Amino acid sequence: MRRRILIAITGVAAVAVLVFAVPLGVTVRDLTIQDELKNLERSANRISRSIEPEHVHGAGARRQAGREDEFRVAVYGGKGRKVAGRGPERLDRDLRASLDGHVVRHVGDSIRVAVPIGAHRVRGAVRATTPASGADTRVLEAWLVLGGFALLAVAAAAGLAWWLSRRLDAPLTRLAGSARRIGEGDFTSRVPRSGVGEIDEVAEAIDTTAQRLGDALERERAFTADVSHQLRTAVAGLRVTLEAALFTGESERDAIDHALEETDRLARMIDELLALRRDSHGDRAVLDAESLLDSTRDRWRGRLAATGRPLRLSVDADLPVVRASSAAVQQIVEVLVDNAARHGSGEVRVAARRASEGLAIDVSDDGPGISRDDDSIFTRRSDNADGHGIGLSLARALAEAEGGRLVLTRRLPGAHFTLLLPVAHAD
């Protein structure tokens, strides 16, 4: 690119100089010749005025012709014969119009001017001449000066093009490098600013795109890990159901029915998670808290009872109207109940009640509780990590996506989580 910029700018400058220099050179030549003609005419006029028309053939004419040293001057009589001075014996054919009262100029191998003698009656003519080589030398000198300035202009343009090409090439190279690193997966790559407005706008766009891609990839990874955890939990529940049927001597048909129920629940969970990921649940409808808790009871009562733990549900009357995705809220409650089943003990309680901010859904148990007093339990960790944090990060993200909040309202004794959903405003 640097070479193309250098060639382009230097070429344009050279063409521009050539376009202006050629006419200017022609004009300089014409002005030089005109100046030479004026000098010759001025000298010839001075001599013609100093000679009396009646004494063209006298000594005065010879004396005046001999005084001019700069040019070759000759005085001619009315018949065109030379009377005095330096010149041909007869007046040049192309200058004889001066004998008719005209000032005649001629440019050729020499520059010649003929001026008539006498105002009313022409008695002769004064011829002044100089070699054309003198004018040519002056023209050449002027052209050399013009050529020097033209070369300086082209050189200055080339220098400017070189500086500009370096100024543009370096940031564009950095842009290409950054785009290449982003294409290879390095979304932390940032483009240094160059001070060129247009290039910096592109750099800003690339940085913004890299940031968005990095954030999107991080969200995808986190969502994949959280969903994997949720699905493993559901699969584990299915395994527990089958093992319980095996050890309790449950009939084959009942075991298959329970397994199909768990399989259907797993399929619904997959569909709900995919719908939440694509945000395809559409407009948020009025949340039926009682129906949601009934569904929770159907899924968890048997599993908790198998470990000797009761499940108690309660729904207050006259709950506030909230709008939220039932699939999202169901997943949040699922995470909280699973968390209580895994890490708590004793009775698991799920309650829906009116709160100052809207609707509150509480999930608590009688276990040892949570010793940490910060929000690190909501930070997603590795799937191999012990304790809270894998599903809770997904639950909090879903709550925030619905405009609500998921908080730990009591740490000890027994963990107590609360999902808060805002009241729906009338349109």
Image: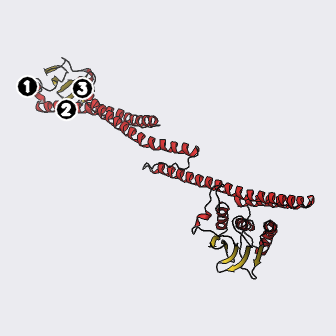
Say left or right for 251 vs 161: right
Residue type pointed to by label 1:
Arg
- State which quadrant residue 69 falls in: top left
Q: Secondary structure at mark 3?
A: helix
Q: Secondary structure at mark 1?
A: helix
Q: Position of residue 197 (x, y in %)?
A: 45, 51
- State which quadrant residue 404 falls in: bottom right
Q: Position of residue 313 (x, y in %)?
A: 77, 75
Q: Is residue 61 above or below residue 388?
A: above
Q: CA distance from mark 2 to mark 3?
A: 16 Å
Say left or right for 1 vs 106: right
Q: Badges 2 and 3: C-beta atoms under 8 Å apart?
A: no
Q: Residue furthest bottom?
A: 318
Residue type pointed to by label 3:
Thr
Q: Which mark is residue 302?
A: none
Q: Which residue is mark 1?
A: 63
Q: Position of residue 257 (x, y in %)?
A: 89, 61
Q: Secondary structure at mark 2?
A: helix
Q: Which residue is mark 3?
A: 137
Residue type pointed to by label 2:
Asn
Q: Earlier in the sequence, mark 1 or mark 2?
A: 2
Closer to the camera in the image, 62 or 3? 3
Closer to the camera in the image, 154 or 363? 363
